[in-house]
Amino acid sequence: MDDVVIAGVGMHKFGRFPEKDPADIAIEAILKALKDSDMTYQDIQFALCGRVVLKRPGLGIEILAKVGMTGIPIYEINAMCATGGAMLKLARDAITSGSCEVVLVYGVDKHKGMFEDLGEPWQNRLGMKASPISFATVAQKYMSDYGATEEDFARVAVKAHKNGAKNPYALFQNELTIEQVLKSPMVAYPLHLYNFCTPDDGAAAVIVCSKKAAKKFNISQPITIAAAVMQTAQYPSSVIEPSSTASTCTKSKAYSVTELAARKAYEMAGLGPEDVNVVEVQDTESAHELVHIEQLGLCKPGEAYKLLRQGVFDITGRLPVNPSGGIQCKGEPPGASGLGQVCEIVWQMRGQAGARQTNNPKVGMCQVFGWNHIAAVSILKK
């Protein structure tokens, strides 16, 4: 179904802004998206606010109260790091249901840092927290299964920083070498400090509307949402009694949650991996970028690191991956990061990405992955 489009996008730079209130950060992104769409706030009929780490009840309404209360429904959504993709699906569903024609989707977060708020200092120094260990386990398995090396994960970070250096919205705008990545502190083998993203502050906003509304408002470059899928994992509960349901689940072929979401997204869009021209994937750390590329079906298992070595995923390559620099360079405000991906793909497809512009992409993909096995995959096309 090709009747839902993105009319406008806007971002507040991702970074550290201790002096700024999150509502002000969000409003900047919202006003940019409204200006980009040539719509006014009075045209919005439904709103979704994403936040993950901010503990501020009613923030979604508080933010829009500063713009003006018009009586529209305003919901707050938390799907962990997959929040942006989940909200895009909800916006698309709201429009296809016929309940509204114009939706504002915005996300905001402020986050001190991945290791700053978690556990005792000695646990952080030894890489014993759940996040580093789980990420490192994925990296170790990838190395064992396919022959990738620490240098390959370093190459992911080098590519990210090469792209991020060209992105004015990124926290880190510096290039790195493989040697610098490998000399950065080891967090959890084989992942070094410069392999990880840095949770930070930021906001992003997207205006979604029906094609009918896009014509009404004379949207100059609408980008079609060909698919928007949010998926949770499939496995039996660890607390339920054995049953036919659990038995059936354990006997079925196991797919990662990203694979499940991607399969549904391709089917919904009527497209395949071979049609994708540019992609933004969840790169919480370097190993997961490679794993997610493969789970999306963009190459065979075990091929991603080899294609990376060949430059296939560079901005000038056959399939640019994370031309924004990904969250390894932008940083990750979890409530906003998924919509940040959408902004980047829209700019790429419009030819508005400046020094990081890829070669005239017609189909783009966004993928986010959240804790507790949540994934969202969106496919955009001209």
Image (cartoon, grey):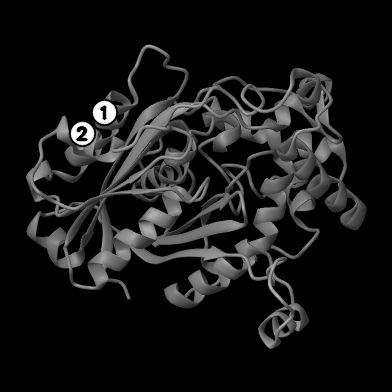
User: Which mark, by number, is residue 31?
Assistant: 2
Q: CA distance from mark 1 to mark 2?
A: 5 Å
Evaluate if marks 1 and 2 touch, with contact meaning CB atoms under 8 Å apart: yes
The answer to which of 241 and 300 lies nearer the viewer is 241
Determine the secondary structure under disc 2.
helix
Instruction: Give neighbour class at mark 2: few <14, some 14-19, many 20+ (Cα, 10 Å).
Output: some
The answer to which of 297 and 253 lies nearer the viewer is 253
Instruction: Give neighbour class at mark 1: few <14, some 14-19, many 20+ (Cα, 10 Å).
Output: some
Q: Residue at x 11, y 54 (%)?
A: 218
Query: Is residue 129 visible to the viewer in this orientation of the structure?
Result: yes
Could you tell me how many numbered marks the image carries? 2
Q: Quadrant of residue 57?
A: top left
The answer to which of 133 and 161 lies nearer the viewer is 133
User: Could you say where residue 24 lies in the image, as x and y percent from the top left?
Assistant: 27, 24
Disc 1: which residue: 28
Determine the secondary structure under disc 1.
helix
